Image: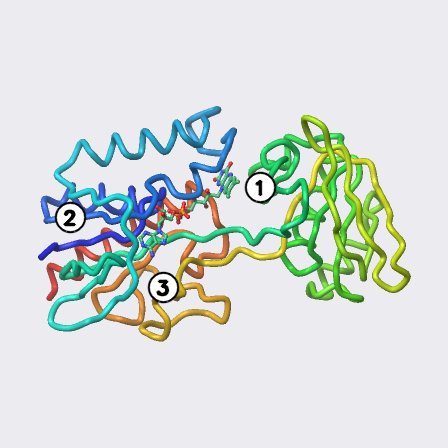
Amino acid sequence: PYDVLVVGGGPAGASAAIYAARKGIRTGIVAERFGGQVMETMGIENFIGTKYTEGPKLAASLEEHVKEYEIDVMKTLRAKRLEKKELIEIELENGAVLKSKTVILSTGARWRNVGVPGEAEFKNKGVAYCPHCDGPLFAGKHVAVIGGGNSGIEAAIDLAGIVSHVTVLEFMPELKADSVLQKRLYSLPNVTVHKNVQTKEITGTDKVNGITYIERDTGTEQHVELEGVFVQIGLVPNTDWLAETLERTRFGEIIVDNHGATSIPGVFAAGDCTNSPFKQIIISMGSGATAALGAFDYLIRN
Ligand code: FAD
C-alpha cells in the first residue's frame, strides 16, 4: 500500500505529492487529466514569483517537478469510490482498487457554463470565469457579468474598479446576492443591472464584441456592445463521486480543518474541491502542501 495516495493532478495534487515524497514515504498520484484547470488557462499573471506564464507551460512544469521524485504517477484514470477499511481504498472507474494509509483528495472544480453560442468559441478571447485572474486584462473596457448571486455581484464590484463599465445580467427577477453586496453594487456609478433577462448569445468575430439577451417578461431582444463577458453562475467541485462518505458543504465542497483533514481520519483534501473560500493556483498549492504535511503528521502518530 501507499503511505500517501493523492487523487487529482492539478496544482493542489502536484504540490501534495511532492511534499509527501520529500518525506521519503511511498507516494502515488492518480489523475484523470494532469494539470487540471491550469490546462484551460491562457495567461497567468498572479503566480507570485513568475511575472507571466501560460497554463499548458505551468502544467508541464508541474509534471516535470513531480517526476523528479519517486512518485507513482497514474494518469487518465478516474476515481469513483472511497472506502475506509483497515486501509483507505480508492476504486477506479476501470475496476482497479488502490490502497493507502492516507489519501489526499484534490479533484478540483469546474466553472458552470451558460451554454450559449459564443461561450466556448470565445473562451480566453473575451469570455472569462475568474475576475481575480483576468480582470486586469479588461482595464478601461466594458464587460458583462452573467449571474447575480454572491460570486457574480462580488465580481461586478471588483471589476467596476478596473473596467469602464459593468453590465450585470441576472436570469431571475431579483438578484440573489447578499443585500450588503447589492447595496454596494447599486452605489457604483459605472454599473448597469438587468434582471429577469436570459443571455442568448455572446457575439464576436475573432474576439468578443457584444452580448445579446432577451427580456423575459416582454420577449424583447437586446444587444450590448462590449469587450468581455465574465460567467459567474457557479463553481462546481468534482466531489459527486464521494457522495455521503465524508462531510461536504451544501455546495459539495469537502470540509477541511487547518491541517487539511476531512471528517474521515487519514483522509485529507486540498485545493478547489474543498471549502477554501478563495480558489486560485497559489492557494491550491499551499493547501496541497498543508494536506501532505497533515498526512505525514497523521502517519507518525498512528
Ligand atoms: P484542478 O486544477 O481543478 O485539478 C483537479 C485535478 O483532479 C485534475 O487533474 C483532474 O483531472 C483531477 N480529477 C478530477 N476528478 C477526478 C477523479 N474522480 N479521479 C481522478 N482525478 C480527478 N488561478 C490563478 O491563480 N490564476 C489564473 O490566472 C487562473 N486562471 C484561470 C482560468 C481558467 C479558465 C480557469 C478555469 C481557472 C483559472 N484559475 C486561475 C483557477 C485555478 O486554475 C484553480 O484554482 C486551480 O487549478 C485549482 O487547483 P486544484 O489542483 O485544486 O484543482
Q: Which of marks 3 and 1 is nearer the N terminus?
A: 1
What residue sits right under mark 2 in the picture?
27
Closer to the camera in the image, 120 or 37: 120
Give percent across and percent down for residue 164.
79, 35
Question: What amino acid type is highlighted by mark number 3?
Answer: Val
Separation of residues labelled 2 and 3 (CA atoms):
21 Å
Question: What amino acid type is highlighted by mark number 2?
Answer: Thr
Identify the residue at horizontal 45%, vertical 53% (top origin).
109
- Report if the beta carbon of the residue with label 1 is closer than 8 angstroms to ligand 1: yes
Q: Which of labels 2 and 3 is toward the front?
A: 2
What residue sits right under mark 1 in the picture?
132
Give percent across and percent down for residue 20.
19, 47
Quarter of the render that holds ligand 1: top left
Q: Which of marks 2 and 3 is nearer the N terminus?
A: 2
Q: Is mark 3 on a helix, strand or loop?
A: loop
Separation of residues labelled 1 and 2 (CA atoms):
33 Å
Separation of residues labelled 3 and 1 (CA atoms):
24 Å
Give percent across and percent down for residue 86.
11, 72
Specify the label residue 256 is tagged with: 3
Identify the residue at horizontal 31%, vertical 71% (top origin).
263
Q: Measured along the vertical axis of the image, is residue 178 above or below residue 279? A: below
